């Protein structure tokens, strides 16, 4: 007659005695009731002629049904000639190694090796690109859990920002990290294919603008030799420095600027994404931007507007005024004011030093995640101030390379 199996009620009501006692369930599975009140599910098995004991779990964390499933799996291993105790130790060791071998940890090992052969600038760019675009997404995951889809999502985020060149480089660096992990037997295969046909190639910009540093040098040389009104030249220079939407600068008023704090507060009603914002957009001003504004005050302080029309002090200059000036500055090259935002975005993303959220906040872009947009009120003002100054210094350096000859400005 077959032995009667344990019931869940018997397991729950089992009382401790003076000595450990076993309540058998059959096929080597039993419940050990310890004098201290703890209850353990154990499995007795025989492998290669030797009797062994496997600790399955502690009641009530492991119930009777779960103990039977675990016992069945262990008996299957025994049938295949595998010791369940040794198998558990191997799995636990792998789990511990997996927790230690996060993508970030492995990437840092790879970078440490590559540091010997990479140029310092390339090493720094690689490190900064990972910190800004990769680690926030899957840096803390075990490298064996990082999928091709996760990598693609990160690359497409860079692609949407227009950082095409650095995106391709970053993808190649990530693939190299996986190759390194493969050589160290941390993973069984590299999840990143050599080519990803889903990622798009660079397309012509909707808003034509500068495409390279060389373009910027030539443009700045022409801009500071511009023969037209100083106010128009300063409008273009400020547009390059602050990288706001053209209408936000063209309609700006002097009362919006705090020169002492070097801040420009754009009223909510003038923001393009005002329906998705709850507060005015604050723009940190670089030293160069403040200097340009101080110069502009000599010309337009009589008006409440930074850039009043020639015919009326209460009306702003038209967008056609700026467009015409840009055609004069560089007749053979089509540029529109909005294109300076694209140039800024491309340059700062390829630089890789600043976090994506900081760049997006500087550009006043709408957050694609509605829930995140509702709860994320961060303005990253300190980091944005650093970004604004870095960008102004970059433009100043390009301007210096243009060998601009200062012209006499009208009084």
Image (cartoon, helix red, strand yellow):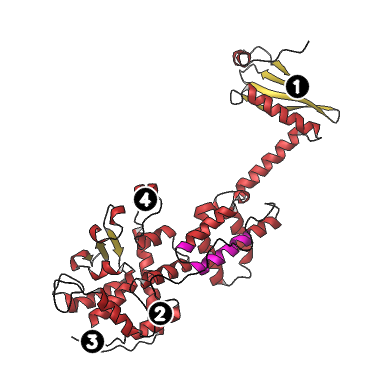
In x, y percent, where is residue 204?
Answer: 45, 72
On residue 409, which mark appears?
A: 3
Q: Can you tell which of label 3 and label 4 is closer to the viewer?
A: 4
Q: Secondary structure at mark 4?
A: helix
Q: Verify whether residue 174 appears in magenta.
A: yes
Q: Report, in whole angstroms, how far the alpha carbon at label 1 lies from the one at label 4.
A: 57 Å
On residue 373, which mark appears?
A: 4
Q: Report, in whole angstroms, how far the alpha carbon at label 2 lies from the one at label 1.
A: 79 Å
Q: Are marks 4 and 2 in contact (CB under 8 Å)?
A: no
Q: Is residue 302 left or right of residue 101?
A: left
Question: Mark 1 or 4 closer to N-term?
Answer: 1
Q: Are marks 3 and 1 in contact (CB under 8 Å)?
A: no
Question: Mark 3 or 2 closer to N-term?
Answer: 2
Residue marked by disc 1:
28
Q: Secondary structure at mark 1?
A: loop
Q: Which residue is depicted at the point 26% across and 69% down?
A: 249
Q: Report, in whole angstroms, how far the alpha carbon at label 3 lies from the one at label 1.
A: 97 Å
In x, y percent, where is residue 162?
Answer: 46, 66
Disc 4 crowd, CA 10 A, few/some/many (<14, 14-19, 20+): some
Q: Secondary structure at mark 3?
A: loop
């Amino acid at each position: 007659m077959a032995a009667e199996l344990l019931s869940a009620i018997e397991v729950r009501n089992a009382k401790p005695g003076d000595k450990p006692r076993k309540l058998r369930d059959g096929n080597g599975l039993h419940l050990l009731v310890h004098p201290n009140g703890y209850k353990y599910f154990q499995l007795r098995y025989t492998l290669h002629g030797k009797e062994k004991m496997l600790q399955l779990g502690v009641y009530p964390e492991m119930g009777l049904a779960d103990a039977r499933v675990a016992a069945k799996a262990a008996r299957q291993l025994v049938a295949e000639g595998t010791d369940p105790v040794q198998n558990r130790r191997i799995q636990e060791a792998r789990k511990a190694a997996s927790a230690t071998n996060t993508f970030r940890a492995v990437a840092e090992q790879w970078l440490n090796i590559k540091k010997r052969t990479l140029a310092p600038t390339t090493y720094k760019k690689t490190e900064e690109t990972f910190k800004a675009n990769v680690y926030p997404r899957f840096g803390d995951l075990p490298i064996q859990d990082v999928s091709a889809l996760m990598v693609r999502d990160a690359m497409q985020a860079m692609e949407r920002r227009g950082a095409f060149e650095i995106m391709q480089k970053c993808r190649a660096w990530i693939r190299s990290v996986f190759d390194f992990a493969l050589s160290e037997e941390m993973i069984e295969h590299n999840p990143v294919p050599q080519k990803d046909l889903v990622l798009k190639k660079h397309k012509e910009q909707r808003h034509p603008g500068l495409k390279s540093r060389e373009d910027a040098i030539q443009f700045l040389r022409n801009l500071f030799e511009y023969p037209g009104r100083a106010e128009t030249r300063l409008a273009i220079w400020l547009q390059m420095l602050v990288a706001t939407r053209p209408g936000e600068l063209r309609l700006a008023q002097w009362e919006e600027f705090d020169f002492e704090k070097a801040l420009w507060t754009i009223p909510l009603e003038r923001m393009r994404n005002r329906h998705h914002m709850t507060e005015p957009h604050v723009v940190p001003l670089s030293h160069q931007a403040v200097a340009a504004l101080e110069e502009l005050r000599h010309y337009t302080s009589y008006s409440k507007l930074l850039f009043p029309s020639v015919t009326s002090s209460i009306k702003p200059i038209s967008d056609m005024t700026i467009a015409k000036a840009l055609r004069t500055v560089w007749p053979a090259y089509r540029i529109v004011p909005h294109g300076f935002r694209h140039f800024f975005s491309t340059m700062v993303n390829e630089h890789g030093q600043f976090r994506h959220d900081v760049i997006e906040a500087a550009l006043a872009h709408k957050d694609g995640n509605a829930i995140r947009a509702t709860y994320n009120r961060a303005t990253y003002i300190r980091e944005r101030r650093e970004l604004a100054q870095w960008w102004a210094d970059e433009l100043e350096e390009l301007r210096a390379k243009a060998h601009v000859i200062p012209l006499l400005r009208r009084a």
